[in-house]
Amino acid sequence: MKFQTPLPLNPGDKVAIISPSSGMPFLFPWVYKQGLNRIRETFKLVPVEFPTACQSPEYLSQNPEARAKDINAAFSDPSIKGIIATIGGIDQIRILPYLDKELISKNPKIFMGYSDCTNLHLFLWNLGIISYYGGAVMTQFAMGGGMQDYTIESIKKSLFHPPIGHVSAALEYSDADLDWADEKNLNKKRPMYPSEGWYWHNTQEQVIEGRLWGGCLEVLDLHLSVRRYLPAFEKLYGSILFLETSEEMPSEGLVYCFISALAEIGLLQRFKTILMAYPKAQFCNRQPPEGREAFILNQQNAVKNALKDYNIALPVIFNMNFGHTDPQIIIPNGGDVRIDCAAKTIEFH
C-alpha cells in the first residue's frame, strides 16, 4: 500500500484549528488562547479557528456531523495547509461516517492530534495518508510554564522538516496535571520525573523496519469491537504497532486482554515490533490503587505476559515518550521506522 506524505508547512501558513472530540476550549478559553499564541509565536503559523473549535461540549456531543463538516472543509480549503486538533475526548468515532473519503484523499494535509484523535488517524491511514500522532492545542502547545524543547523540536520536524529522523529518549518526563480552572497555572511548570530511558524487551541484534500503525490503546480496543474502521489485516503485515494509554489509566487486566485479543484474531502476529509509551499513571491528583510506579511496571508485565502466554516473541520497546506524557515525540502514523536493536536507535523516515 502506497502512502502519501502531506506537503510540509512553511512559516506564515494557515492551519485549521478544529475540535473533533470534546469542547475543552469552551470551558477553559485561557488555556486555549495560550495554545494559539504559541502556534503563532513559536511556530510562526496562522491559526484559523473553524466553526466548532470553541463550541460547548454539549453542542459537540449533539452534533458529530458538524465536527466532521469542519474536517472536510479544512481538507478542501486550499488556503489551509495543515490541521491541528484542540484536544481529544471519548466519542470521535461518531464523526467518521460523515467524513468525505474522496475529498480528503485528493487533498492530503498534515493532521496533528492524539488520544481520541486515534479515530481520525485510523481513517487517514486507511486512505494512505501519513498523519502525525501528538501535539494538541490545549496540552502540548499550551503547556504551563512554556513548551518543552524536546516537544518543540519534534513538532517542528513533523510540520516543517519531515522526515523526523533519529529520535532519542527524553531525560525526564511528566504525567502530572495542573488544574486548568486556575489561570495562575498557565505560567507554572509541572513536576518532572527522571526517565529510565527506553526498555528493550525480546530484542536481538537485528534491524527492524516497517510502517507505523497504532494510537491510544483504549480507542483501538473500541475498534476491535466495532470492526468497521480497522484496515484489512493483510495490509498490516510487517508493520510496527505503537501504543499508549490515557488518563483513564486502564488496568493491567485490560491491557493484557487487549494484547490477547490481537493475538486471538491473528493480528498481533502480523506486527514486527511494539513501541510502547510511558503510561499516564496519575490524573488530577488521582492515582491507580497500586500507585504510580507499580502501575507502570504492571502495564509492562501485562504486555510481556500476554506475549509469553501466546508464545509470540515480539520485540517491545517500553518507556517511549509519546502519548499522554510529556515531552512528546510526534509519531508519523503511516510513516516508516527503522529500529536498530544492536545500536538501540530509532529513526522515523
Image (cartoon, rainbow, N blue to C red):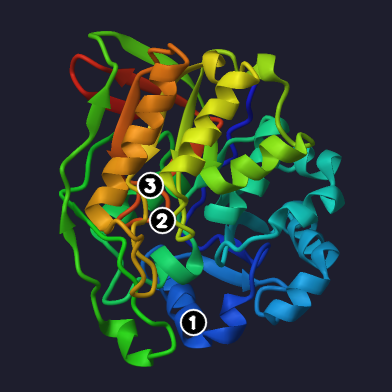
Marks 3,1: beta carbons within 8 A = no
Per the image, the residue denoted by label 2 is 324
Three-letter amino acid code of the residue under disc 1: Lys
The residue under the point 49% across, 62% down is 136
Per the image, the residue denoted by label 3 is 322
> What is the x, y in percent for residue 191?
20, 69
Per the image, the residue denoted by label 1 is 33
Quarter of the image with the N terminus in it: top right
Q: Secondary structure at mark 3?
A: loop
Q: CA distance from mark 2 to mark 3?
A: 7 Å
Q: Residue 107 vs residue 180: left or right?
A: right
The residue under the point 68% across, 35% down is 224
Marks counted in the figure total: 3
Three-letter amino acid code of the residue under disc 2: His
Q: Secondary structure at mark 2?
A: loop
Quarter of the image with the C terminus in it: top left
